[in-house]
Image: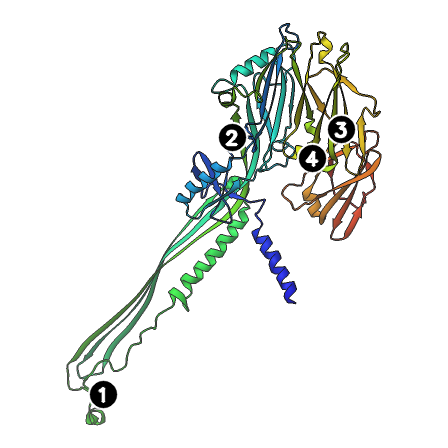
Amino acid sequence: MSSKIFRRICLALLMVLMTPSASAVVMYDEGREIVDGIVLLRDKEFSNDYYYLPDAPSVVIDKLSGKPKISLVKFVDPKGDTSGGLIHFLFSLDLPPERVEAITAELQQKVPGAKVKGPVPLRAEGDEETGGASFSVISSTVTQNTGGDSFTSSLVSSGIAPVTPGSQAAVAARLNQHGATLLWESLRQPISDISVAINASYEAALPAYRGKVFAEIETVYEHMFKIFNSQQGYSKSEVRKQVDEMVREGVIEVDITDRAGLDVDASQLSGIMNLVTDKLVNMLFDTSQGLSALPEQQKVPANVVEGRQKRGFLGRLFAGSGNQKYITDNQYTMREKRDVKRGTFSMVFTQNTTIRVPFNSAGNISGLYDAYANDETLFRVVALNDAAFQKRAVFFEIDPAYYQAFQDNINSVSVTFTKAYPGKRNQADFTDEVLFNQNDVKQGTFSKSLVYPRLGLKGADWTEYEFRTLWSFRGGATIGIPAELTKTQSSSAPSISLSPPAGLTRIEVDGDAASMVDAQIRRAMVEFEYRLLGESKSKSVALLPQSEEILKNVSLLHDDTAPIRYRVRWYGLGGVSEQAWQVLEAPYLFLLPPTDETG
């Protein structure tokens, strides 16, 4: 391998090591710290890395102006025809950087070297039951109800919770005069009548089970022999006996905590315990090595009795077996040896698993009026009784359903606004323009407004205006609504929702992971064909049976007049199997691997 290639490999490895993990897993309870009311969870792999659980959703603070991104306009008509209000705000889950720094400094006093890496990675993808991370507006005034008692005539929200760092969500509503009055008054109280609730989840690791093996071992070796010898001049009598006995006692304690509710495979625990037991038994009872090795056994020595009287030569020659001279020769000898070995064996083992932990939080929009009550860019009361000086604001908002389309298909949308003043000869038409591009939508700017003067118009038609939208798509295509340059749309509404001249279909692609594994399918690739602005488009999504979440969501911006077709390719050990193109009949696809009969 050349040095150049080696340097590239080292550089690539360094980049991988330096790249922060977007899918960090935190510990559920181990290492948990609470600092300034914020829960900090420790990283599963790196003990000095911590992630914070977001406190509560709050109104976004603009980095340039330092003001909250909220606007409440209350317009008053003495006649009572058009009185009401408009509210629009952006919110997020991020903590301010200065607070994160303060939390980090206090955390390091408890855990030296600790670092706060950011918020706990919340799950944004959905499933069939929950539909993914979402938020809801909790209010008795800002709520979309039907009937004469409703305070809100329209409510628009992005609907997707801002679970990724830096993301924002929007809420906008138009209120009647009673709803506007109640909401305005509630914002002056410690707790207002508008809250935002977040429903999401995150992955956390915790021990599936813990095991402890403990043994107190004592090995005792005893050796004893005793001799009694009595000589009285007749045939010698000797009693000799050896006693060798090993005493081994082991007290074994096994303590296991099993979290049965975590769906842990019990056979894995049984296998580990069998292995530990086998090793421990070998250590306890293998007498050839280790703690239980037998000490060198003692042997009875020869000629233990010194100076014993023996029959002489003449006695052995002439005495024979008759009566012998009586000689007393009594001796008793005893020897004892004790060899004791003691030891302790202890082993702790743990296996972790991951669980999905629900995250539910709610935040109240309060305290802003006290700080910004005199700021008319945030809180404004418009009187509609002075026709000469009266102005009117018109809001243009991107339909939340098409936020993702700005990242995939749409470059921008512009609105050309015209307000004519009939009967005023020397008064030119009021014209203005608003523009939304990809960067605006990415940064959470979903609503823009323009203000035009009434200029003394006395009729009700002073609220009427004309506008034309121009949509720019990737690839250079532009579509105007209306299509003709000289045509415009008329309206008198205080807010206009903008949606592109195309249909939007959200498709859920699901599959039977178990059947795919049984059929040895490694990947299922679903291809979609559709038309957008008359041009053929395609999009693909892959289903992996080994992944934790097999469900995939696909959004297609397409021409309503052309059907959506799809085809499935199965990649298995036996090769690639391709199914024929089919017309999409429903926004939910459930895939089953092909059989010999289906092909």
Of discs 1 and 2, which sits in the foreground? 2
Of discs 1 and 3, which sits in the foreground? 3
Q: Are marks 2 and 4 in contact (CB under 8 Å)?
A: no
Q: Are marks 3 and 4 in contact (CB under 8 Å)?
A: no
Q: Earlier in the sequence, mark 3 or mark 4?
A: 4
Q: Earlier in the sequence, mark 2 or mark 4?
A: 2
Q: Are marks 1 and 4 in contact (CB under 8 Å)?
A: no
Mark 3 Cα shell of 10 Å, populated few (<14), some (14-19), many (≥20): many
Real-space Cα separation, disc 3 to disc 4, in angstroms: 14 Å
Of discs 2 and 4, which sits in the foreground? 4
Give the percent coordinates (x, y) of residue 575.
77, 52
Real-space Cα separation, disc 1 to disc 3, in angstroms: 134 Å
Q: Is residue 14 left or right of residue 235?
A: right
Q: The residue tagged with tag 1: helix, strand or loop?
A: loop
Quadrant for residue 597, please give it. top right
Residue identified by numbered label 4: 438
The reply to whether residue 150 is visible in this rendering is: no
Residue identified by numbered label 1: 321
Q: Amino acid at mark 2?
A: Ala
Q: Foreground residue, 66 or 456?
A: 456
Q: The residue tagged with tag 3: helix, strand or loop?
A: loop
Q: The residue tagged with tag 2: helix, strand or loop?
A: loop
Q: Which mark is residue 500?
A: 3
Residue identified by numbered label 2: 56
